[in-house]
Image (spheres, rainbow, N blue to C red):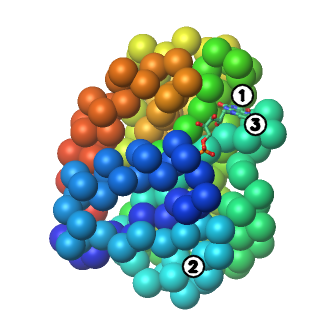
Amino acid sequence: MNKTGIFYSFNTLNSAKVAKKIEELIGKENIDTVDAENVTESQFLKYDNLILAVPTWFDGEMPTYWDEFKPALEDMDLTGKTVAIFGLGDQKNYPENFGDAIGIMATLVENAGAKVTGFTSTAGYVFEKSRGVRDGEFVGLMIDVENQNDLTDERVKNWVEAIKKDFK
Ligand SMILES: Cc1cc2nc3c(=O)[nH]c(=O)nc-3n(C[C@H](O)[C@H](O)[C@H](O)COP(=O)(O)O)c2cc1C
């Protein structure tokens, strides 16, 4: 498997915790960590396998650091790249926008030519609406540390096993 780049904000608590679990499961020697706060186009283009941490903020939006990178993403050619997205969200406090940001990011990278992998079932989550859901599945992995943290380890483990199969 080619080296994977995992992109998350080093300033976050929750995304960073999940990212560290993923790094361990993929194997530290197989993965580079990149701070999404200062991400550049060349860092993004360096990897064929990318994992992006996209928590939802601001009632259904991406965090500021990803939003600032959006124009660059819209201009990039990500053909041939495989992208797996995980999101953090709070289904109890934001049931109408649960994990919206993973959907926003999935559409952005797909429009740039990437293949998005790692879709997961919505079974076991309780919410009303999400832009992160397509045809009944999340377009990535949703982690809810506020309400279901006891499920985090298992969700991450199953997801990493699945995405590894799609990474080249
Ligand atoms: C101001 C604010 C707005 C939020 N908006 C949403 C939202 O619209 N949808 C959602 O699913 N979670 C929302 N959340 C929950 C966060 O996604 C959740 O706390 C997550 O764990 C934060 O991850 P991070 O620490 O990696 O940024 C919000 C949290 C805050 C504090």
Secondary structure of the residue carrying tag 1 is loop
Lower position in the chain sequence, tag 1 or tag 3: 3
Q: Position of residue 81 (x, y in %)?
A: 42, 70
Query: Which residue is under mark 2?
Result: 77
Query: Which residue is under mark 3?
Result: 60
Amino acid on which disc 3 is placed: Gly
Question: Which residue corresponds to the image point at 41% horizontal and 53% vertical from the top-left?
Answer: 19
Question: Which residue corresponds to the image point at 67% horizontal and 41% vertical from the top-left?
Answer: 56
Question: Which dot, 1 or 2, sits closer to the camera?
Answer: 1
Secondary structure of the residue carrying tag 3 is loop
Q: Position of residue 137 (x, y in %)?
A: 47, 29
- Residues at badges 2 and 3 in contact (C-beta under 8 Å)? no
Q: Mark 3 near ligand 1 (CB under 8 Å)?
A: yes
Quick check: which quadrant has ligand 1? top right
- Label 3 CA crowd tier, 10 Å (few <14, some 14–19, many 20+): many
Lower position in the chain sequence, tag 1 or tag 2: 2
Q: Position of residue 145 (x, y in %)?
A: 50, 29
Label number found at residue 67:
none
Picture quarter with the N terminus = bottom left
Q: CA distance from mark 1 to mark 3?
A: 5 Å
* Image: 23 above or below 103: below
- Residues at badges 1 and 3 in contact (C-beta under 8 Å)? yes
Amino acid on which disc 2 is placed: Asp
Label number found at residue 97:
1
Q: Is residue 47 left or right of residue 89?
A: left
